[in-house]
Image (tube, helix red, strand yellow):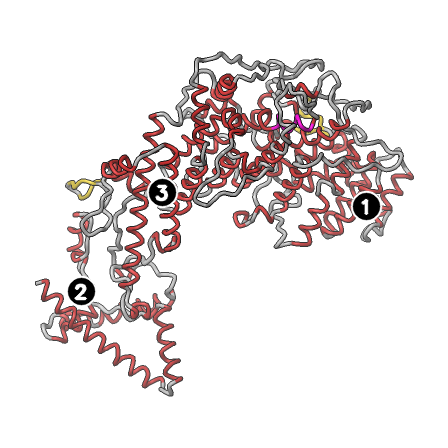
């Protein structure tokens, strides 16, 4: 706990009491703030910030949100940094929430513009990169204030490294780790105001629980994601430079630019893994460095904070342990977390690719690179590449096998395609011919080879275990196949693999650095080898640095992956047939359903099963989309891996995906045992992947099946009790009538007897043997009268009759007469069909 937090805890109640007694007009808009300022001027040797902090805390409870923001703007403008530094930690926590998640803050993740437009616009204006809150940050930055941040809330690998007294690789933590004093609570970081603000901003995405109904929140309308987008666009500009901090008040100190140490040239940062934030923790008063570097440190800090807080949750050692099936799963990101990382990657690609051709020349060229140009060139490979790869590997291996994986997939595909965010637009081409990937992106593909190849293998493993009949899963396969089928991309990946498979080179291991006083005449990362121009060495260095020198690399275009691709092609073909079969069944059942069954006069569910199936939930449009996605995905896979139609046809036949004589889908693969059908290993695989299925029917008492959504529960129960009483009272008479051989007996059997279980198609001999003992006698069923469809049809009939001047009694007689004629006809047809069967 910081000194001013302890001061707040000690003086909170006394200051509130003084405020209540000495300043009775704090309930007005600004009277409390003026009174607090007057008290601070009158007693400068006392706890001046306590009055201001107590006033703001009281206002946070008593005043509406808009007025609180107006008061905060006035406070930031009027009060000096000496008084504002005490309220800064409280204000940051009140906005972004506490680090333990107990306090939600302003709930920026749940604040939506279309739901709360006034609060949304006020929060956006206050927290904008050029707004009042950032002015407060710069105001404190000019005074060299430091704020304690507990190490215990940092990502797992960083926290573990610091607790082991090992300095993390990222220069973000250099010169900031403070060992606890005797009796201290723990390790902490001494951060400047800008770093402290960004730490809370980034970590609130992880520490704060998602609000209720977060699944229905659009990120484009969410305050938090809008703020992330604005900060990225502000500090990682694609045109021009970062806007300078606002001008301070006349005579006041200028915001601390936190420049680099002059002994570390910024240009070396393109040749070595040098620190981007090489500066002492104490305030540097000399500002003689390049003015461009004054603006770059904020961009560096923003990028490193977002990368560390969002991506650095898995170390290389932890990643290698996760390959074991016995390893426990660690941090699991949320879908919102993944969406924020994708937003960061898109901005980074646009930022890095905004270099002009003369600026994008390699190091050593005659062009003198500015700090901003060097930062653009080195941002992705130096800070993002390794941590993103480990993050993606964990997501691919641990994310549930459902449609929510689409967020991870799109994040991966966004990183794979930096050309989509390049400022120069390719010439538009025809729809039938996709745009070719330029050769200028070959170095990026080679330096990110594992992100293309090994993660594709991970996606392949997931796709083989999902139900491709689902439109969402089919869409994911289509998206991946379409991206990798872009002209020239597969060739560039193959060339990268060929470079890696050349004779081995030994890559020196990176050594840990202990907590020692750093020398500012060299690089914190001087143990890294200098960058070289040899393409083969670059590819090997990339692979070995991520997977280790003893890794077993599986080529994407090798025989092992090709077998898996052929297997996926088989499943795609099977899924297409399954979707077509389900579509045909849906069409037949819809066409065969008589109109009177909808009105309730004909049993629409004769076998007692639920009317809905998978197609009812997906719909015909979704089935059509599934077929389109799978058709195009198969076409793209054939282009990437050069599959022939003969291979696909042969493998399709080998799996037994042909249809039977009637064109219906076959049952899952099984054998007949003593107790019925037994699934084989292939049959279990077919059921798990939705390729085949059994036709499950309700085999119990139709009167006791669950009440449906289109039935009135109380009316169904009352009708069941009434029909049960009638059946018990007249059981003998109904049995005698049904046993007659004349037309009256047939008429009664049609209404009082249901098809026996032995007449139904059973898939198990055990069920067929048990059916004989469950035969039921004749009985009356009135359940159809509890259906909303039946009641609606009767109401409609009486309404039409009233329009035709037909009374209710006559209308009822006509309905009864009509049904009797219908029942007579059905009785004759039923008896004729039974005679034919005999």
Disc 2 from disc 3: Cα separation: 44 Å
**Marks 2 and 1, the one that precedes in the sequence:** 1
Q: Nearer the viewer, residue 772 or 543?
A: 543
Between tags 2 and 1, which lies in front?
A: 1
The residue that mark 1 highlights is 74
Q: Residues within 10 Å of mark 3 (few under 14, many from 20)?
A: many
**Marks 2 and 3, the one that precedes in the sequence:** 3
Q: Position of residue 5 (x, y in %)?
A: 74, 33
Q: Residues within 10 Å of mark 2 (few under 14, many from 20)?
A: some
Dot 3 falls on a residue whose secondary structure is loop
Point out the image quarter for the N terminus. top right
Whether residue 721 can be seen here: no
Q: Is residue 373 magenta?
A: yes
Disc 2 from disc 1: Cα separation: 86 Å
Numbered tag placed on residue 467 in the rendering: 3
Q: Nearer the viewer, residue 220 or 99?
A: 220
The residue that mark 2 highlights is 777
Please tell me which residue is depicted at 54% across the width and 35% down the height of the picture.
419
Q: Position of residue 384 (x, y in %)?
A: 57, 28
Q: How many circles with numbers are drawn on the protein?
A: 3
Residue 740 sits above or below residue 71 on the image: below
Point out the image quarter for the C terminus. bottom left
């Amino acid at each position: 706990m910081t000194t001013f937090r302890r001061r707040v805890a000690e003086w909170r109640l006394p200051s509130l009491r003084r405020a209540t007694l000495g300043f009775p007009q704090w309930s007005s808009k600004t009277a409390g703030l003026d009174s607090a300022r007057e008290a601070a001027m009158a007693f400068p040797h006392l706890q001046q910030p306590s009055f201001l902090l107590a006033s703001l805390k009281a206002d946070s409870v008593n005043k509406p949100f808009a007025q609180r923001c107006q008061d905060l703007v006035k406070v930031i403008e009027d009060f000096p940094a000496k008084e504002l530094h005490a309220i800064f930690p409280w204000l940051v926590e009140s906005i972004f929430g506490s680090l333990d998640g107990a306090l939600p803050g302003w709930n920026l993740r749940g604040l939506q513009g279309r739901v709360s437009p006034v609060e949304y616009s006020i929060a956006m204006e206050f927290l904008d990169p050029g707004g009042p809150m950032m002015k407060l940050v710069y105001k404190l930055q000019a005074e060299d204030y430091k704020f304690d941040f507990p190490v215990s809330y940092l990502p797992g690998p960083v926290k573990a490294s610091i607790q082991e007294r090992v300095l993390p690789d990222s220069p973000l933590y250099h010169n900031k780790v403070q060992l606890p004093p005797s009796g201290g609570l723990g390790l902490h970081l001494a951060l400047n105001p800008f770093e402290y603000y960004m730490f809370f901003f980034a970590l609130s995405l992880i520490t704060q629980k998602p609000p209720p109904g977060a699944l229905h929140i659009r990120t484009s309308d969410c305050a938090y994601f809008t703020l992330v987008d604005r900060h990225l666009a502000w500090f990682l500009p694609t045109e021009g430079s970062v806007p300078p901090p606002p001008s301070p008040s006349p005579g006041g100190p200028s915001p601390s630019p936190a420049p680099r140490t002059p002994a570390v040239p910024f240009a070396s940062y393109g040749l070595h893994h040098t620190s981007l934030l090489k500066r002492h923790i104490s305030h540097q008063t000399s500002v003689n460095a390049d003015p461009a570097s004054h603006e770059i440190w904020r961009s560096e800090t923003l990028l490193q904070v977002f990368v560390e807080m969002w991506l650095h949750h898995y170390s290389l050692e932890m990643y290698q342990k996760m390959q074991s099936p016995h390893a426990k799963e660690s941090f699991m990101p949320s879908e919102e977390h993944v969406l924020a990382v994708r937003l960061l990657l898109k901005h980074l690609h646009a930022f890095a690719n905004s270099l002009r051709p003369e600026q994008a020349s390699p190091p050593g060229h005659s062009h003198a690179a500015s700090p901003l140009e060097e930062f653009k060139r080195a941002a992705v490979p130096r800070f993002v590449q390794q941590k993103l790869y480990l993050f993606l590997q964990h997501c691919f291996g641990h994310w549930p096998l459902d449609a929510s994986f689409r967020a991870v997939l799109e994040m991966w595909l966004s990183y794979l395609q930096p050309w989509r965010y390049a400022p120069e637009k390719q010439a538009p081409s025809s729809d039938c011919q996709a745009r070719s990937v330029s050769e200028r992106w070959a170095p990026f593909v080679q330096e990110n080879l594992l992100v293309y190849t090994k993660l594709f293998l991970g996606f392949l493993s997931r796709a083989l275990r999902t139900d491709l009949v689902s439109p969402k899963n089919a869409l994911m396969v289509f998206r991946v196949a379409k991206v990798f089928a872009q002209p020239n991309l597969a060739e560039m990946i193959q060339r990268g693999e060929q470079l890696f498979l050349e004779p081995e080179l030994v890559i020196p291991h990176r050594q840990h650095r202990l907590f020692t006083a750093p020398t500012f005449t060299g690089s914190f990362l001087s143990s890294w080898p200098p960058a070289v121009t040899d393409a083969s060495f670059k590819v090997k260095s990339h692979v070995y640095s991520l997977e280790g020198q003893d890794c077993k690399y599986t080529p994407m275009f090798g025989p092992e992956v090709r077998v898996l691709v052929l297997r996926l092609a088989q499943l795609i073909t099977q899924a297409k047939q399954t979707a077509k079969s389900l579509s045909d069944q849906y069409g037949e059942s819809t066409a065969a359903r008589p109109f009177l069954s909808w009105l309730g006069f004909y049993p629409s569910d004769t076998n007692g099963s639920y009317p809905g199936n998978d197609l009812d939930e997906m719909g015909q449009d979704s089935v059509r989309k599934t077929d389109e996605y799978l058709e195009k995905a198969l076409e793209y896979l054939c282009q990437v891996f050069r599959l022939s139609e003969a291979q696909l046809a042969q493998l399709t036949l080998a799996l037994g995906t042909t249809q039977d004589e009637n064109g219906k889908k076959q049952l899952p693969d099984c054998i007949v045992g003593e107790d019925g059908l037994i699934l084989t290993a292939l049959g279990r695989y077919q059921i798990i992947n939705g390729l085949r299925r059994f036709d499950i029917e309700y085999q119990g008492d139709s009167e006791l099946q669950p009440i449906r959504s289109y039935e009135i529960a109380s009316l169904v129960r009352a009708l069941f009790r009434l029909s049960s009483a009638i059946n018990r009272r007249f059981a003998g008479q109904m049995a005698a009538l049904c046993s007659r051989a004349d037309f009256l007996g047939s008429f009664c059997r049609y209404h009082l007897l249901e098809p026996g279980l032995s007449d139904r198609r059973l898939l198990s001999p055990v069920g067929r043997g048990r059916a004989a003992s469950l035969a039921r006698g004749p009985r009356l069923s009135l359940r159809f009268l509890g259906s909303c469809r039946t009641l609606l049809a009767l109401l409609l009939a009486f309404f039409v009759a009233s329009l035709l001047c037909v009374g209710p009694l006559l209308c009822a007689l006509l309905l009864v007469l009509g049904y009797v004629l219908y029942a007579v006809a059905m009785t004759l047809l039923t008896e004729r069909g039974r005679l034919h069967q005999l």
